[in-house]
Image (cartoon, rainbow, N blue to C red):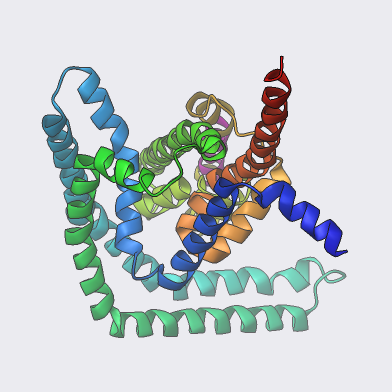
């Protein structure tokens, strides 16, 4: 047994780069899991800078100096943050408050619908089952109300944290954009000079992650905006809230679209009943989902990630459970990174070990 373990270690960890790669991955996981809340502004700044680095590169290709490209990108970031803070958040707050105020009326209508089930389907549903279901739904909404009340009472520290983020994150983003090459050179100075495995993994992942993150952000904006416009034209209540929910649903593959269908359908039903407007709503919502899955996704993600659907769902569950929203957002790139490491690591070491004997045999000649 010890011989097998020793041969396995010699095969995969006999190289300095392999050991260093394991240490980097382990330290990164420990730091994120133990200090993720503290480093959240730093992580968010790195992600935003990564998203906007493409604009800096494009401006430099058009002849703009580095300082001007960074300045233009930073001003656009400030304008987007101001739009979110001054326009989007107040609308979402108002619609969320209205929706929470109409919950009792929706519950009353839902109870009247449920109470008709034993009369229409006596062989399938009993009055006792309906009463138990109504009691459980009422209790669940009661707990949600208590959680909202608790959140509103203790929301002052959260608001202070949000304000700190709105000040600190743009500053960090500016320096990450301005000094990205210096930071990259500083990190590279701690790595071995010859690092074929890391170079292979980075070369495979850099462009793919960049395309995925930027493509997913564009997809969220397009799907959310189109959904909001469609809902607003139909006169759906809480159109902005539902539009953002539909936009964010594309973050979670396969699951998000199915989950967000429930609130869209419920709000449409409580507003119109089984009228023609409700069916128009569901038809347009189905068209948006179909266009997103069959046209927008292939267009934005031309380099498809070769992952099995089971692997994608598992990645969403694992990384989402570890890091919440950002874990879900980066589930596919992280899964692709794990796959790249598994494929590149033994291949890189094996190739290096095969090249050395070939060189040794050629020297006597």
Residue 217 relative to residue 2: left or right: left
Observer able to see residue 316? yes
Q: Magenta segment, which residues? A: 278-292
- Image quadrant in which you'd find residue 169: bottom left
Residue that protrudes farthest toward the front in the picture:
364
Give the camera-side residue of 13 and 222.
13
- Image quadrant in which you'd find residue 337: top right
Quarter in which the C terminus is drawn: top right
Vertical placement of residue 37 versus 253, above or below = below
- Image quadrant in which you'd find residue 52: top left
Residue 205 relative to residue 346: left or right: left
Majority secondary structure in the magenta region: helix
On whether residue 304 falls in the magenta region, the answer is no
Question: Residue 361 at what x, y percent from top left?
Answer: 74, 23
Question: Residue 137 at what x, y percent from top left?
Answer: 60, 78
Give the camera-side residue of 244 and 164.
164
Vertical placement of residue 226 versus 32, above or below = above
Question: Residue 66 at what x, y percent from top left?
Answer: 16, 30
Say which residue appears at 17% left-offset and 36% top-offset. Answer: 70
Say which residue appears at 20% left-offset and 43% top-offset. Answer: 77
Observer able to see residue 273? no
Say which residue appears at 37% left-offset and 50% top-offset. Answer: 239
Question: Residue 30 at what x, y percent from top left?
Answer: 50, 67
Say which residue appears at 66% left-offset and 49% top-offset. Answer: 14
Residue 290 relative to residue 1: left or right: left
Give the camera-side residue of 197 and 170.
197
């Amino acid at each position: 047994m010890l011989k097998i373990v020793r041969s396995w270690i010699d095969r995969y960890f006999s190289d300095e780069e392999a050991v260093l790669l394991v240490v980097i991955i382990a330290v990164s996981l420990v730091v994120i899991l133990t200090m993720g809340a503290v480093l959240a502004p730093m992580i968010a700044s790195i992600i935003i800078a990564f998203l906007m680095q493409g604009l800096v590169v494009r401006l430099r290709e058009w002849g703009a100096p580095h300082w001007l490209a960074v300045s233009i990108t930073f001003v656009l970031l400030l304008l987007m943050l101001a739009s979110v803070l001054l326009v989007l958040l107040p609308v979402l707050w108002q619609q969320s408050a209205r929706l929470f105020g109409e919950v009792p009326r929706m519950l009353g209508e839902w109870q009247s619908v449920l109470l008709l089930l034993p009369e229409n389907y006596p062989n399938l549903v009993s009055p006792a089952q309906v009463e138990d279901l109504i009691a459980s739904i009422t209790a669940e909404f009661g707990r949600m109300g208590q959680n909202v009340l608790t959140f509103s009472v203790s929301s002052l520290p959260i608001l202070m944290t949000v304000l700190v983020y709105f000040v600190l994150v743009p500053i960090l983003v500016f320096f990450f954009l301005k000094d990205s090459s210096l930071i990259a050179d500083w990190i590279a100075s701690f790595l071995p000079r010859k690092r074929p495995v890391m170079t292979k993994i980075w070369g495979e992942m850099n462009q793919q992650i960049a395309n995925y993150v930027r493509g997913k952000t564009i997809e969220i904006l397009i799907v959310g905006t189109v959904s909001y416009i469609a809902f607003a034209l139909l006169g759906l209540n809480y159109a902005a809230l539902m539009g953002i929910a539909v936009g964010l649903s594309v973050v979670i593959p396969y699951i998000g679209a199915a989950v967000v269908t429930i609130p869209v359908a419920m709000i449409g039903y409580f507003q119109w009943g089984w009228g023609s407007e409700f069916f128009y709503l569901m038809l347009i919502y189905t068209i948006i989902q179909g266009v997103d899955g069959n046209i927008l996704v292939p267009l934005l993600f031309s380099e498809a990630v070769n992952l099995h659907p089971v692997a994608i769902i598992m990645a969403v569950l694992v990384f989402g459970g570890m890091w919440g929203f950002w874990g879900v957002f980066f589930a596919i790139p992280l899964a692709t990174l794990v796959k790249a490491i598994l494929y590149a690591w033994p291949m890189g070491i094996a190739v290096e070990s095969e090249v050395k004997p070939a060189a040794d045999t050629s020297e006597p000649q």
